Image (cartoon, helix red, strand yellow):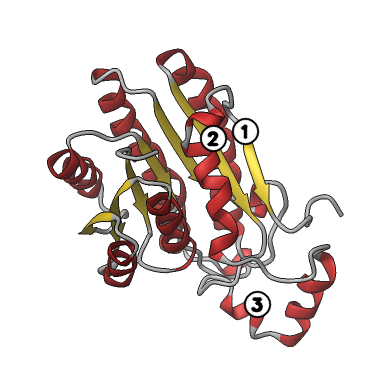
Amino acid sequence: MKGKVAIVTGSARGLGKGIALGLAEAGCKILLTDMIPPTETEREIAAIGGSARSIVCDLREKSSIEKITNGALDGYGKIDILVNNAGVTKRYPAVEMPTESWDEVINVNLRACFLLSQAVAREMMKRNIRGKIINMASMQSFQGGMLIAAYTAAKSGLAGLTRALAVEWAPHGINVNAIAPGYMATELTDPIMKDPTRNRQVLERIPAGRWGTPCDLKGAVVFLASEASNYVHGTILCVDGGWLAR
């Protein structure tokens, strides 16, 4: 994958950081994007001899879409891979959830993924690039989740969007797939990990017997971003320690 250019959203920490490092280790040049400066990710990529640039942006704002695509094109001249990793959740009982919180979760987790995929696909088609778009789905793409109605709706919608775009863009040489992480140890899941009861319940359900880590996604994302997956379209690859198999 040497010389390929990848955009990874939400790459300052957590899963996005692990994904960016995995792609850099495989030889990709990375455009890192996040609401906070992804300084540590950029430093770690440089430490392994990789190339990374950073853009600070807020995916709740539509202007970020053009900022990201232009940043990749200005910095590297093309876009080969897009990983829509950035996400947010708001925890409320469904009957108490404010409309503005619902809108924020849907906008970041679903709307921004579509808009950025749309913008990147246009560039890939214009430049006749065989491209890879990878969305970050979730266990909530398959199941309901307590206190996260908007997140569940967004991730279920993202699974459907992945299939729809895969069907439409496959003739253009663009593979659209998704990764569905299981329970991963990140800031997003920190409230569950700190709850002794919920943490025990989660671990009892995972056949692998542990929470996942960002490094566990490296192999999956490199596979879906590389030529090894050229005949894979519209798949949601679960990296869940066996959670859904149980």
Total marks shown come to: 3
Residue position for label 3: 192
The answer to which of marks 2 and 1 sits earlier in the sequence is 2
Type of amino acid under label 1: Thr
Label 2: few (<14), some or many (≥20) within 10 Å?
A: many
| As drawn, 39 above or below 145 | below
Closer-to-camera residue (22/107): 22
Q: Which residue of the protein is positioned furthest toward the left in this rendering?
A: 74
The percent position of residue 2, horizontal first and vertical second, equals 35, 40
The answer to whether mark 2 and mark 3 are in CB contact below 8 A is: no
Residue position for label 2: 177
Please give left or right for residue 224 compared with residue 173 in the image.
Answer: right
Q: Could you tell me which quadrant the C terminus lies in? A: bottom right
The answer to which of marks 2 and 3 sits earlier in the sequence is 2
In what element is the residue under mark 2? strand
Residue position for label 1: 235
The percent position of residue 12, horizontal first and vertical second, equals 35, 66
